[in-house]
């Protein structure tokens, strides 16, 4: 439905004065007006999805919309292997030409905020239609009070525990299905006992049995996505929301001391693993647990169905300061030099609509976690298997707090904390490099001061 602009329409200033907060996200901007029904062209750059067949569905959704709205569409899928997507975004930002709409990895909005069109109207309309967004959407997409990107409908994911039911029961005496059932009926006592102290004991038993827990510890994305939340669970953060350095604390030392014990029960080569290292560890049949979205399960279902049948996705352990799970949401932005901005905004809203979002979630086999909270009622996480219910706890069901590595630092600082692998490097210095905690923390402070100067 088109919304006709009239002389009596609210001005941007009037709208900003009267806009109300919705849920956890406050979205401000001019009233959204659909204006794309006209001949024109639109070029879209999307992430090349890991899950086979997912690209076909997103292309179909886009092409259907283009035909309906008389817009000639071009869709390119850009791999994240070798950071090609990040390089493409950097090149287009500098050249001020390329695609109109870009799918954006977690930190690209903050890094290129000045070259993205404000999307306050788009986000406000999405919230009006479909309800509140996850807090990560605002943290990553709203830069200095302006929405520079909208929550993306494709590829966003989180990092739950991905564990072997049989290994945990046989070697650690833990029934994960009982602690984290595929239903809302949880035993609060059992969930509370799933904490980092007990997890360490379980990992030591699994290591002794030859089926260790494994995650990378290095300059990789997956390294940040489990280590930064683990540190947060101890109350340790590199920098606060005001940009003050907060790494030199007892909480940081507690987290490092814990990691010294945990790494002793992990495969010794985790420091050399890439982002696929933990996936390969689990799919091989050797690994008992990793932290990952369902991509490892997807590969196992295809190549090692006997492994896939034992995989259960569930909550991460609890620390002294809560239970924190890592996430890598994606966003969609419109370059401020785009030739067809109104069509670009309309397309993003169409892809964020419930019907489109549900098709995309189904195509991803449950990999994609939407930032529109209401969409997490999609039945796929209840029904998909084997084992049936193995992904039920992939969307948050309990007391976990979702976060991105680098939080709560200001987004530009958080992006550097993440991309420069501050926490994994700090851990490696202490657990593998033989450095003292004081020396390693001093190094981290120096790095953070460098980010501030930059």
Image: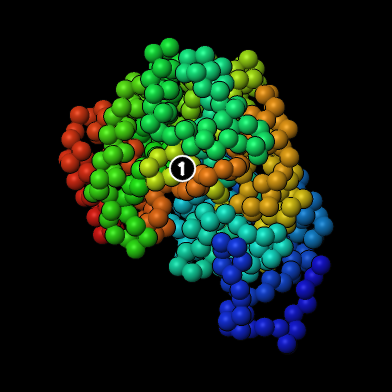
In the image, what residue occupies the spot 32% across and 32% down?
A: 259
Q: How many marks?
A: 1
In the image, what residue occupies the spot 70% across and 59% down?
A: 130
For this view, does 41 lie left or right of residue 187? Answer: right
For this view, does 371 lie left or right of residue 452? Answer: right
Q: Position of residue 330 (x, y in %)?
A: 56, 49
Residue 369 sits above or below residue 125 on the image: above
User: Quarter holding the N terminus?
Assistant: bottom right
Residue 125: which quarter of the image?
bottom right
Q: Secondary structure at mark 1?
A: strand
**Residue position for label 1:** 323
Q: Nearer the viewer, residue 109 or 241?
A: 241
For this view, does 397 lie left or right of residue 385? Answer: left
Q: Nearer the viewer, residue 406 or 180?
A: 180
For this view, does 214 lie left or right of residue 162? Answer: left
Residue 381 sits above or below residue 377 on the image: above
Question: Residue extending furthest bottom?
Answer: 7
Residue 186 sits above or below residue 321 on the image: above
Q: How is the image coloured?
A: rainbow
Residue 184 sits above or below residue 118 on the image: above
In the image, what residue occupies the spot 39% across and 46% down?
A: 321
Q: Nearer the viewer, residue 342 or 163?
A: 163
Q: Dot 1 surroundings within 10 Å: few (below 14), some, or many (20 or more)?
A: many
In the image, what residue occupies the spot 68% across and 24% down?
A: 386
Residue 239: which quarter of the image?
bottom left
Q: Position of residue 242 (x, y in %)?
A: 34, 63
User: Quarter holding the C terminus?
Assistant: bottom left
Q: Position of residue 366 (x, y in %)?
A: 66, 37
Q: Position of residue 147 (x, y in %)?
A: 54, 65
Q: Nearer the viewer, residue 155 or 20?
A: 20
């Amino acid at each position: 439905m088109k919304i006709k602009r009239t002389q009596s329409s609210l001005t941007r200033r009037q709208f900003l004065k009267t806009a109300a907060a919705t849920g956890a996200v406050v979205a401000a901007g001019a009233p959204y007006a659909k204006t794309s029904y006209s001949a024109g062209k639109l070029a879209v750059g999307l992430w090349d999805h890991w899950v086979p067949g997912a690209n076909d569905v997103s292309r179909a959704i886009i092409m259907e919309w283009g035909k309906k709205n008389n817009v000639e569409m071009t869709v390119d899928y850009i791999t994240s292997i070798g950071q090609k997507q990040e390089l493409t975004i950097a090149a287009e930002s500098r050249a001020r030409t390329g695609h109109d709409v870009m799918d954006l990895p977690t930190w690209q909005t903050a890094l290129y905020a000045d070259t993205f069109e404000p999307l306050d109207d788009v986000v406000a309309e999405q919230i009006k239609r479909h309800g509140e967004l996850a807090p990560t959407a605002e943290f990553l997409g709203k830069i200095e009070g302006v929405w520079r990107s909208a929550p993306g409908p494709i590829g966003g994911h989180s990092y739950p525990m991905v564990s072997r039911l049989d290994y945990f029961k046989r070697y650690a005496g833990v029934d994960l299905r009982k602690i984290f059932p595929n239903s809302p009926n949880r035993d609060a006592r059992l969930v509370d006992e799933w904490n980092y102290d007990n997890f360490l004991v379980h990992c030591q038993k699994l290591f002794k049995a030859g089926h260790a827990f494994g995650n990378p510890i290095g300059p990789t994305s997956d390294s940040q996505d489990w280590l930064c939340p683990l540190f947060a669970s101890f109350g340790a953060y590199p920098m606060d929301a005001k940009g003050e350095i907060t790494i030199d604390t007892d909480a940081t030392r507690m987290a490092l001391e814990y990691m010294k014990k945990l790494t002793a029960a992990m495969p010794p080569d985790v420091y050399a693993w890439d982002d696929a290292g933990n996936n390969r560890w689990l799919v091989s049949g050797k690994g008992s647990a990793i932290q990952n979205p369902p991509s490892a399960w997807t590969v196992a279902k295809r190549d090692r169905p006997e492994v896939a049948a034992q995989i259960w996705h569930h909550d991460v352990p609890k620390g002294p300061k809560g239970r924190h799970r890592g996430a890598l949401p994606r966003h969609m932005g419109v370059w401020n030099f785009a030739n067809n901005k109104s069509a670009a905004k309309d397309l993003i809203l169409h892809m964020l609509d419930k019907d489109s979002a549900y098709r995309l979630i189904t195509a991803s086999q449950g990999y994609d976690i939407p930032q529109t909270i209401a969409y997490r009622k999609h039945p796929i996480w209840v029904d998909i298997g084997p084992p049936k219910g193995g992904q039920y706890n992939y969307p948050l069901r309990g007391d976990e707090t979702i976060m991105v590595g680098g939080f709560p630092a200001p987004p530009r600082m958080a992006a550097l904390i993440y991309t420069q692998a501050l926490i994994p490097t700090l851990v490696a210095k202490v657990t593998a490099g033989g450095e003292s905690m004081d020396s390693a923390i001093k190094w981290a402070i120096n790095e953070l001061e460098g980010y501030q100067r930059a």
